[in-house]
Amino acid sequence: MNDHDHAPAPLPIPTAPAAAVEPRAADADREAVADRLRTAAGEGRIDLGELEERLDRAYAARTYPELDALVADLGGRPTAGSEDGTDVLVLKPTMSSIKQTGRWTVPRRIVAECRMMSIAIDFTEADCPHREVTVEATCRSGHIRLVVPAGWGVRIDGSSTNTGHIINKAAATAEPGAPTITLVGHPGSGRIKIKQHRR
């Protein structure tokens, strides 16, 4: 018997730990962050140039950390569709008007307030997971404009004031399965206008 018969077994070669896999973001996550960025711009937290830059990065983001980095400096204000149960989009322009258009996710409640500026909310390309949506619209000398797809319904809530300055050209009753928007409008000398796309 030689010494090689009792040689210890070779130790396993250590391997580097596998890198942590970052969770992948979904389209709804990107839209929620985009909504939050638009709200931040309306509040004056970021300017329009920075808004465009961050929106580009949001839609190109693949992971949650990438999205988190875009809103990390905007405070703890919850955004539409957040997990804490808050489902509201706030649009309050200060230095420039706001256009909520293109692809976005409609929350259960939208608060739109302006003085001299204008707000345009276009639902025609938006994803609306709710059958009932409330829009609280208040303007002084500014204007608020809503555009809804064919089939949607828009009704003016009884608590609205100065309804002579609310112009609703949308159907009051939605088609089966389509959303209904309840507008709580409080225009001053400005106007709130609702337009509906026709088929």
Image (cartoon, helix red, strand yellow):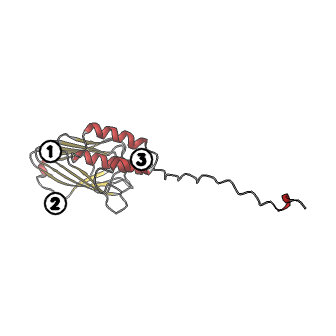
Label 3 packing within 10 angstroms: few (<14), some (14-19), many (20+): some
Residue 199 in view here: no
Q: Dot 1: what SS?
A: strand
Residue tagged by mark 3?
A: 66
Label 2 packing within 10 angstroms: few (<14), some (14-19), many (20+): few
Q: Earlier in the sequence, mark 2 or mark 1?
A: 2
Residue at (74% x, 57% y) in the render: 10
Q: Dot 2: what SS?
A: loop
Between 133 and 6, which is closer to the camera in this rendering?
A: 6
Relative to residue 130, is residue 189 drawn left or right? left
Residue 142 in view here: yes
Instruction: Please state the horizontal and vertical placement of residue 126, each as a whole percent of the image.
Output: 36, 46
Residue type highlighted by circle 1: Arg
Label 1 packing within 10 angstroms: few (<14), some (14-19), many (20+): many
Residue tagged by mark 2?
A: 159
Residue tagged by mark 1?
A: 191
130 versus 41 height, above or below:
below
Q: Dot 3: what SS?
A: helix
CA–CA distance in space, label 3 to label 1 = 40 Å
Residue at (53% x, 52% y) in the render: 21
Residue type highlighted by circle 2: Ser
Mark identifier at residue 53 = none
Relative to residue 121, is residue 177 drawn left or right? right
Residue type highlighted by circle 3: Glu
